[in-house]
Image (tube, grey):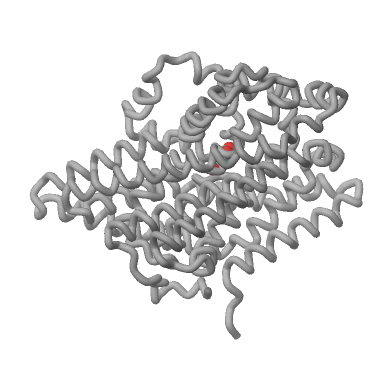
Amino acid sequence: MKKLALHWQILIGMALGVIFALIFTNFSWGADFIGDWIKPFGTIFIKSLKLIAIPLILAALIKGITDLKDISSLSKMGTRTIITYVITTVMAVSIGLVVVNVVQPGKSITEETRNELVAAYGGDAAMKAAASKKQQESGPLQALIDLVPENIIEASSNNRNMLQVIFFAIFFGIALILIPEEKGKTVKDFFDGVNEVILKMVDLIMLAAPYGVFALLAALVVEAPSADLFVALGMYALCVVGGLAIMIGIYLVLVKVFTKKSPGFFLKGIAPAQLLAFSTSSSAATLPVTMERVTEHLGVEEEVASFVLPVGATINMDGTSLYQAVAALFIAQAFGIELSFSVQLGIIATATLASIGSAAVPGAGMVMLVGVLGYAGIPEAGLALIFAVDRPLDMCRTVVNVTGDGAVSMMVAKSQGKLGDPHVKEWDDNYVG
Ligand code: ASP
């Protein structure tokens, strides 16, 4: 019998997780049962994905760079990648601004609801604001300083330091290209092998994906806030989700125009990574799967994917930047603050930078949103307004972040003549479809 395609298996897992939780919340012990006996399996699933993110970045980037063989191809690909990432991010923020200006969701928030939300979520919002303050207090070149690790073991010990690991891997890869080939061969072969092993680990973890997402979604349902809040914030949430949907449409057009691949082909290839992004709210945790899908199912050659994707997972967050623009204007509208056209133009720049600076982990976009609010003179207390629906929106924006990385990797691969046919590994029989 033909095995069900992976994205269907994951979707069924997600749906069953939601149904299971909805049934169990009817019992007084249901939420505790899910928290104690179901949620841990979701946590284990995410942890095992995160576990391989740093070794994957190291091995894949070093392999990718040495496969390029010379520095000029690396700088050509690097420049194209960064420029494309910035362009898509600016497009995303602009879409967010247009949607929120047209719909004006903040205007429908009554003063009563606003006060209620501030009272209920003010404490949580203050914590996010404090986390962000720490980042803002540093000098203008702090981001550059932070890019360079002083100890690679220490940098690799925290998934939040991915940019530092990327810096080390690129530096190491460049040095490896510069030494005589016969001297570097053993090292290169070693990293090639490690890369293969890690991709196999991804395959094995993905066998558990339908069960992992079942547990994750069941836990999310029992922890979700009351439905009333969703109604109050419904227009805002719809603006974010609508903007994100437009962005997905733009990727499909870009992929079609630049690579001639059909939307169906792209979506089918990337779908498991999207579903995982949705379930985990983390581009970093999803990275190993994005890598596997893009190389084996979308035809991007490994040397391109292993550079473009790790960099994208950390700096290219189109969904996050779009959300930050919508959220900032929503809060301004709710507080009755008019933002001039020039301030809104400034939001394009700050949201682009804030999304680049957001870590690829759940909730990071909201921490960096504080910077955008500060720039535009919008009260930080406004974070409390959007807190309740942030998790579901985080799930959706992470899908767009990951989809954007996949689309750009195909475009860069095409421009480098490195977009081939999909090639699911022969020994890999886990995937059908
Ligand atoms: N969760 C997002 C990601 O990992 C970041 C964010 O917007 O909070 O891509």
Q: Which residue is at 33% across, 34% downward?
A: 152
Q: Which residue is at 18% across, 46% downward?
A: 71
Spot occupied by residue 418 in the image (x, y as percentages of width and height): 30, 62
Q: Quadrant of residue 124?
A: top right
Q: Nearer the viewer, residue 285 or 38?
A: 285
Ligand 1 quarter of the rendering: top right
Q: Is residue 322 visible?
A: yes
As drawn, is 18 to the left or to the right of 133? right
**Residue at the bottom extreme of this rendering:** 1
| Residue 145, above or below 264 | above
| Residue 140, above or below 394 | above
Spot occupied by residue 72 in the image (x, y as percentages of width and height): 18, 46
Q: Nearer the viewer, residue 72 or 240?
A: 240
Q: Nearer the viewer, residue 411 or 47?
A: 411
| Residue 323, above or below 69 | above
Q: Which residue is at 33% across, 58% downward?
A: 413
Q: Quadrant of residue 121?
A: top right
Spot occupied by residue 9 in the image (x, y as percentages of width and height): 63, 68
Where is the N terminus found, in terms of image quarters? Answer: bottom right
Q: Nearer the viewer, residue 185 or 394?
A: 394
Spot occupied by residue 187 in the image (x, y as percentages of width and height): 20, 51
